Image (spheres, rainbow, N blue to C red):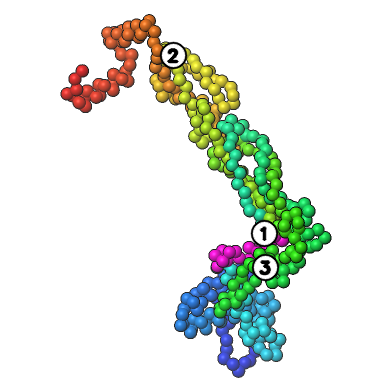
């Protein structure tokens, strides 16, 4: 709509849009962002003793006070500054009745809200305060983590009082509007340039007070009681992961929304398998003779089955065999499984009989006299040692 030119004998005032540095079609978010930036720049606390900065600060507050209100903005777009002069019906809403506290309060909570204990979103939420989140530690086996598990847990928690249905008021009565904050849950106090909003000390942000508390819960609207919950543990979970049960935490005070329950999982150590992400490994001891001659060995898997593994002749201790897709499933749901690694541990015989000792001694003599080494790794190692220390003698 074209702006009506109005003659005035007073000094022409700067355009409100130009003061804030925004276009005439700027939306509410753009206006607020521009005002916030300029308000912080020219605030008197940041410019002590600067009269020009103080003047500029008041001007941008005046501009924002008008443009943030749709009705005032429409009048300003049509009639300009004259819309708020005497005779145009502007009244208190324009520069003469400008309320600085209300305009700066719009961005004060955005800037300092968290520091002061919450902004506009931190007040009442349909009644009492939100209940606290809870933690429950649950230990499971590696097999549980592999297969997944349905289980039940018993949690000591607060539940809604059945007598007052969570209101906190005695039977036949209801909470009443808090006279201190008129039901808003917050009170405001103006200190110089600042308007500070705090939680109401009378109702603690609830907005209502109870004159006759419920005898069963003492006015809290909740009582302590154990509750049993079903928990679904997905396959593939790892140690330290947590499961969130929304709304299963502490019940809020006086009908407030409940918190959440977080179940922290701890996977107990396994006597056979060690886990590394989606892969698992196990150490399998085999007799020295089987490692030397070759053979087969049966190894367990997480499914509870057994796999027959072929051991080639001459297998050394520490050699790994890879069994594809025999590891853990992926908890992210990408499908597939990790691998299983079998680590061979060649066992040295102990408690030899006389005949066994005799045979081993004969075996050693045959190896040293036959010209062909049966222990190439050990002989190669000591050959390198001799090269490094030429003065080493037998």
Instruction: Depth check: give the residue in front, 207 or 245.
Output: 207
Q: Quadrant of the N terminus?
A: bottom right
Label 2: how many Cα within 10 Å (few below 14, some 14–19, many 20+): some
**Would you identify the image quadrant in which residue 301 lies?**
top right
Indicate the position of residue 30 as horizontal and vertical percent values. Answer: 59, 70
Query: Which residue is situated farthest in the front direction here?
Result: 215
Instruction: Identify the residue position indicated by label 3 in the image.
Output: 202
Q: Earlier in the sequence, mark 3 or mark 2?
A: 3
Q: Magenta residues, as a range?
A: 112-129
Query: Which residue is situated farthest in the left direction here?
Result: 391
Q: Residue 129 has which mark?
A: 1
Indicate the position of residue 68 as horizontal and vertical percent values. Answer: 64, 75
User: Is 177 contained in the magenta span?
Assistant: no
Q: CA distance from mark 1 to mark 2?
A: 70 Å
**Would you identify the image quadrant in which residue 165 lies?**
bottom right
Residues at marks 3 and 2 touching, judged by CB atoms closer than 8 Å: no
Q: Secondary structure at mark 2?
A: helix
Q: Nearer the viewer, mark 1 or mark 3?
A: 3
The residue at 42%/23% (across/down) is 319
Indicate the position of residue 323 as horizontal and vertical percent values. Answer: 51, 25
- Number of callouts in the render? 3
Query: In the rendered view, does 272 fall on the left or right side of 288?
Result: right
Query: Which residue is situated farthest in the right direction here?
Result: 172
Q: CA distance from mark 1 to mark 3?
A: 14 Å
Instruction: Depth check: give the residue in front, 280 or 210.
Output: 210
The residue at 50%/79% (across/down) is 44
């Amino acid at each position: 709509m074209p702006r009506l030119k109005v003659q005035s004998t007073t000094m022409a005032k700067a355009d409100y849009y130009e003061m804030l540095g925004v276009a005439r079609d700027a939306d509410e978010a753009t206006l607020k962002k521009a005002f916030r930036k300029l308000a912080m720049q020219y605030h008197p606390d940041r410019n002590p003793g600067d009269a020009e900065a103080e003047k500029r600060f008041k001007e941008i507050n005046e501009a924002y006070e008008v443009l943030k209100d749709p009705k005032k903005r429409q009048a300003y777009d049509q009639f300009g500054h004259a819309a708020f002069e005497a005779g145009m019906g502007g009244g208190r809403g324009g520069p003469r009745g400008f309320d600085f506290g209300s305009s700066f309060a719009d961005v004060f909570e955005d800037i300092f809200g968290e520091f002061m204990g919450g902004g506009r979103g931190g007040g009442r939420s349909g009644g009492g305060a939100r209940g606290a989140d809870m933690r429950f530690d649950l230990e499971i086996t590696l097999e549980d983590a592999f297969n997944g598990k349905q289980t039940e847990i018993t949690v000591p928690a607060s539940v809604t009082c059945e007598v007052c249905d969570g209101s906190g008021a005695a039977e036949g009565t209801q909470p009443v509007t808090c006279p201190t904050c008129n039901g808003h849950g917050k009170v405001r106090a103006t200190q110089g340039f600042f308007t500070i909003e705090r939680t109401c000390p009378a109702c603690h942000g609830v907005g209502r007070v109870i004159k006759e508390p419920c005898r069963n819960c003492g006015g809290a609207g909740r009582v302590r009681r154990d509750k049993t919950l079903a928990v679904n543990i997905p396959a593939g979970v790892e140690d330290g992961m947590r499961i969130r049960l929304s709304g299963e935490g502490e019940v809020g005070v006086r009908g407030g929304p409940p918190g959440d329950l977080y179940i922290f999982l701890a996977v107990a150590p396994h006597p056979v398998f060690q886990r590394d992400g989606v892969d698992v490994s196990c150490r399998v001891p085999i007799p020295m003779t089987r490692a030397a001659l070759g053979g087969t060995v049966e190894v367990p898997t997480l499914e509870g089955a057994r796999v027959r593994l072929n051991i080639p002749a001459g297998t050394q201790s520490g050699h790994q065999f890879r069994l594809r897709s025999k590891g853990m499933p992926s908890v992210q749901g990408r499908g597939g499984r990790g691998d299983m690694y079998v680590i061979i541990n060649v066992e040295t015989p102990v408690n030899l009989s006389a005949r066994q000792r005799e045979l081993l001694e004969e075996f050693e003599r045959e190896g040293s006299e036959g010209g062909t080494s049966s222990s190439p790794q050990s002989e190669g190692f000591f050959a390198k040692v001799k090269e490094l220390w030429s003065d080493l003698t037998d």
